Amino acid sequence: MNSPYTHHDKYRSEYSMDVVIACDVTASCVRIVFYDIALSRRIARSAAVFADINAENAATELAKHIFVAMREYGIPASAITKIGCCAPIDIAMAIEDELSPTDMFLRPDAEISVLPFVSAYAGGRFAAMLATVPPKEGTFVADFGSALNLAYFTEGRFEIVTVQLSGAFDGTALSEGIAYEFGAIDEVYRDESGIVCYCVYGDEDSCGVSASAALDGICLMLEKDIIDEDGIMTDRDQFYIGEDHCLLQRDVRAVQTDKAKASAAIQCFLKRYPTPSEVYLTGDVTACKGVERLVQLGILPKELAENAHFSPVSAEQGIIDCLSDEAKLSALDKLISSAADVSNDILDDFDDLYITNLSF
């Protein structure tokens, strides 16, 4: 297992005494944003990758990361008024039950809230993403992560589908996978001489391969017939990215499986509705050329991607919006309570499309 790695970014030195903390937590990454309500701007951001977060340690680990970040930025406990969190359901429930302001030496009246779950399978991270989306007729949303969450706004509510994935789109299933943060290889390409080159987010030393870079690598291998249409490496066991990183056969399989599931789910889901008027995409895999690669691999229809709004970390902004404006949190609660899970309605065609989409 890789050692935990934390990067701190400080944007402002001045702040008011009304600062909120937005926390986006997954099993392998903790993202923390300090936002000044009075000044309407971000103060600082921290991201810890290769974290090991679960229901048993979630409250303790999050408290530790928040406390370390506050000390790093010199933000006093008296300035923190609210903390908002989004996380997978088991982790979110642990945070809600166990995290206390005193764990971080905050004032006792500091509020801690956890964003609501969209469904039994779609946690608060998807809710945070939906908080950033204007609910208009014909709006389509796709969130790529450990699961694929889809939503379409029609007749005053979101209809949603969740399909569990193996982890190719958030990096957790990749042999050298890492969240899209500082130190992640975020782009892989061939130069004019044909040499495989890569870029690292933040120009730091490379720590691992992000989901979007893995899709780059898959597309490069397909172009050079290094993998065949069945996803089999034809003449080697590894595809090297520089001297220190590589994609393995099992990484190809993870991408192949999630590609087939995502393609099938999106095709089945969109059969139900008119052509979307607005498209919003989120997840680590949408970084850099990720959206282009989703189209190239047949996961996302080209016409949807052409005018899509996308961000790999939109959940952060959703939490900030809810912490900044109670009306937005109330509106999100109503939006989620009215949502309908239509996952069972797409099952009839899913298996056949999944098999069809397994080939590259």
Image (tube, rainbow, N blue to C red):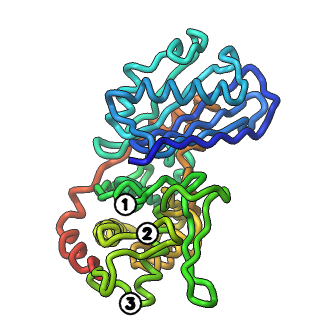
| Residue for point 63% across, 20% down | 81
Dot 3 alpha-carbon crowd within 10 angstroms: few under 14, some 14 to 19, many 20 or more: some
| Residue for point 41% across, 34% down | 116
Label 2: which secondary element: strand
Q: Hey, what amino acid is under mark 3?
A: Asp
Q: Is residue 278 above or below residue 68?
A: below
Q: Position of residue 2 (x, y in %)?
A: 43, 48
Q: Position of residue 325 (x, y in %)?
A: 62, 32
Of residue 232 and residue 77, the one placed in the foreground of this image is: 232
Q: CA distance from mark 2 to mark 1?
A: 8 Å
Q: Hey, what amino acid is under mark 2?
A: Cys
**Is disc 2 in contact with disc 1, using a CB cutoff of under 8 Å?**
yes
- Residue 273: which disc? none
| Residue for point 51% across, 22% down | 112
- Residue 246: which disc? 2
Name of the residue lying farthest toward the top: 108
Q: Earlier in the sequence, mark 1 or mark 3?
A: 1
Q: Position of residue 357 (x, y in %)?
A: 28, 78
Q: Earlier in the sequence, mark 2 or mark 1?
A: 1
| Residue for point 42% across, 57% down | 171
For the image shown, how many numbered marks are present on the structure?
3
Q: Is residue 337 above or below residue 168?
A: above
Q: Is residue 174 above or below residue 95?
A: below
Left or right: residue 32 compared with residue 113:
right
Of residue 19 and residue 189, the one placed in the foreground of this image is: 189
Residue wearing tag 3: 225
Q: Quadrant of residue 22?
A: top right
Of residue 151 and residue 298, the one placed in the foreground of this image is: 298
Residue wearing tag 1: 175
